[in-house]
Image: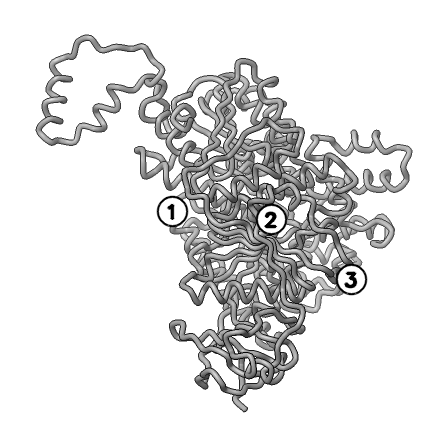
Amino acid sequence: MQKQAVFTTEGPLLILAGAGSGKTTVLVNRIANLVSYGNAYNSDVFYSELSDDELQMLESGAKGQDISRELTKKLSVGACKPWQILAITFTNKAAGELKERIAARVPDGDDIWAATFHSTCARILRRYGERIGYTNRFTVYDTDDQRRLMKEILKGMGIEEKALPHRSVLSEISKAKDKMITPQEFAKEVSTDSRRRAMAQAYALYTKRLKSADAMDFDDLLCNTVKLLEENQDVLEYYQNLFKYIMVDEYQDTNKVQYRFVNLLADKNKNICVVGDDDQSIYKFRGATIENILNFETAYKNAKVIRLEQNYRSTQNILDAANGVISNNEARKGKTLWTENPKGDKIILHTALSERDEASYITNTILEQVGKGRHFSDFAVLYRMNAQSNIIEQNFARSGVPHRLIGGHRFYDREEIKDMTAYLQVINNPSDDVRLRRIINKPKRGIGDATLNNAAEIAAVLGESIYSVIKRADEFEPLKRAAGKLKTFCDMMDDFIDALNDDSVSISQLYALILDKTNYINNLKKEKEDSETRIENINELSSNIINYEKDNMEEASLSGFLEDIALISDIDNYDNDADCVVMMTIHSAKGLEFPVVFVPAMEDGIFPGMQSIINPEELQEERRLAYVCITRAKEKLYMIRSQERMLFGSTNRNRPSRFIGEIPPQLLEETTPPRVMATPSQMQGLGVRQSQRSGFAGHTSAAGATHNGSVATETFKAGDAVMHKAFGKGMVVTAQKLGNDTLLEIAFDKVGTKKLMANFAKLVKM
């Protein structure tokens, strides 16, 4: 079926790609075929005679000369150029990998438009944004910027956070934009609801403030591009003619505005190929509309549907479990995954005593398997909600398990990085009031909130940006006292803006100038205890800028760099070469794969959530999430439930997840922990080989996003009496050398047997 998908080039095509079915390979080969051979496979063109030049070419090939390019050109029928293909992915990482693989296959492969929806739309808006009132230097507001702006708006409206949380307002605005509902339309829909009327007013003010700042949020990138295409026929026709072929990955996760964008571009040639899996539609909370993929054949008449059901990564037992769960959903296209891989191990269903015992079980199992030759990077812990990660992360930190939390504190979310990028944003776009407010007093310049508020009020009355007002501070009575300080700040910023407009000054040189003139680093040393780490981050940003310049050469621009970092997601930074256990939500794990997967809290009320249990439509989405979760595992899958669990300060005894009951029982191997844990003295009587592995973990503070340790100063052997800060007294049962470290099995008096890495455990011999 992969071959059929590659060679079906003309007309609407829906590729239903099951998990692990090689869809990226299909996309790469389909694009390579379009560029190299076009529709030759389906063509009835027949060469009955060859010219003298063609015969000479074949003779050259027979003599060992490389004639592949000439032969390809001769055999192609209606081949297109790489830049005539638009390939939309859902992550920058996927887009980068796609371009890299295509560039290795076909000449000028780098010219393909392979990008996310947001990046594609931003590129179009940079060129034609002035048609709808934006400059080509418009700013993209990230989540933090949006929140800052909305807080200002609600405060100006006299609305307290408790009465109407800013996050709720932004969520409603995002939902409205996903459905292409304007502030005016939103206001009409909520005219009878006072709370939603306030939201409508905030939506209108938010839109106005963004426009005046020459800024867009993520949703605007899509909505404004659709608006641009709908209102400017010449622009629409340009891109319709440019993109002869359009491909969209993860089509099941598209929303209404994304559907409209693709539909507009594909309306002329109808050569649209969408790749997706309705069984993996898990982003309804972000506005994803599963009907887009379910109704594809209705929207595009004569569409062809190809199912990719052979899985190339997982064992048959894992696939049978996934098939068993998802078969209980009603709204689906229907397919059954199969593989030529071995049947594999059964799925381990472990019942823990508590969430602490669950964390210990995961930790001990990982350490045990690492001791047998696996790498830490073979393991992933996937959870339904972020709150579940804390106890597991604490256990990993104490036991010396290196781990990385995906979805934690992003590099570009750190305070010092937000400060430096805010400087760059204001230099690029002086109308950016939100970023200006952030940096005007960083480092401290004695410019108070009252001065800023006065400037903002004057700017609102005049319809100008705050920056344009403070540049003329001596003209406004409320600003005269601070006019000197404001002038000093504006003179510095003007110097930066002049440097930006100087073609001889690179982005990295501009960044160095900012660090020098603002004296930011020296002030950081005085104010922050962790200044060394923060300075390292600031220097790392410099490295990122230099790498961006190297990657983009003459096309590098400040607005381009700022756009890139605004659209980065956590998964884009995922490094699968790092030897550490990966921890992430199931939503974040989509598209990834791991040899061994642990799924904690397989309990009704958590997975699926309580709200989903009483809502049939939401339950189907949760079931799709379970399907995604199961199919992340290549070789081994552990599902764990606890007899009782404390979460959000409340202890509950939850029923096993109904999804476990949907897995054929012959695929499961159930395990339970011993209820009585041996002490060191008991173990001496029983013999160390009968030691117990379960235990309860205490509470300590978690380390950073990626955790590594130092080398232990002492060596340990079986029989050593030891003391651990959290677990107390214990005795070493076994000591297994692993590279520069030692895996210790220790029986503690209070918490039973645990496995710890010596370099991390901070043990003291007694």
x then y, percent, for residue 420: 57, 60
Give the residue pinned by disc 2.
586
Q: Earlier in the sequence, mark 3 or mark 1?
A: 1
Task: State the SS at label 1.
Answer: helix
Nearest-to-viewer mark from 2 and 1: 2
2 or 3: tag closer to the N-terminus: 2
- Left or right relative to 277: residue 696: right
Quadrant of the rendering where the C terminus is positioned: bottom right
Residue type marked 3: Thr
Q: Is residue 11 above or below residue 481?
A: above
Q: Could you tell me residue 716's position as x and y percent? A: 46, 83
Task: Tell me if residue 28 can be seen.
Answer: yes
* Number of marks drawn: 3
Q: Is residue 210 above or below residue 30?
A: below
Pointer 3 with pointer 1, Cβ within 8 A = no
Please name the amino acid that badge 2 sits on: Ile
Please identify the quarter of the rendering in which residue 649 is found: bottom right
Mark 2 and mark 1: span between their CA atoms?
37 Å
The image quadrant of residue 479 is: bottom right
Q: Label 1 crowding class (10 Å Cα cut-off): few <14, some 14-19, many 20+?
A: few
Report which residue position mark 3 lands on: 651
The picture places residue 524, in percent across and down from the top left corner, at: 59, 72
Q: CA distance from mark 3 to mark 1?
A: 57 Å
Q: Which residue is mark 1?
A: 553
Type of the residue with mark 1: Met
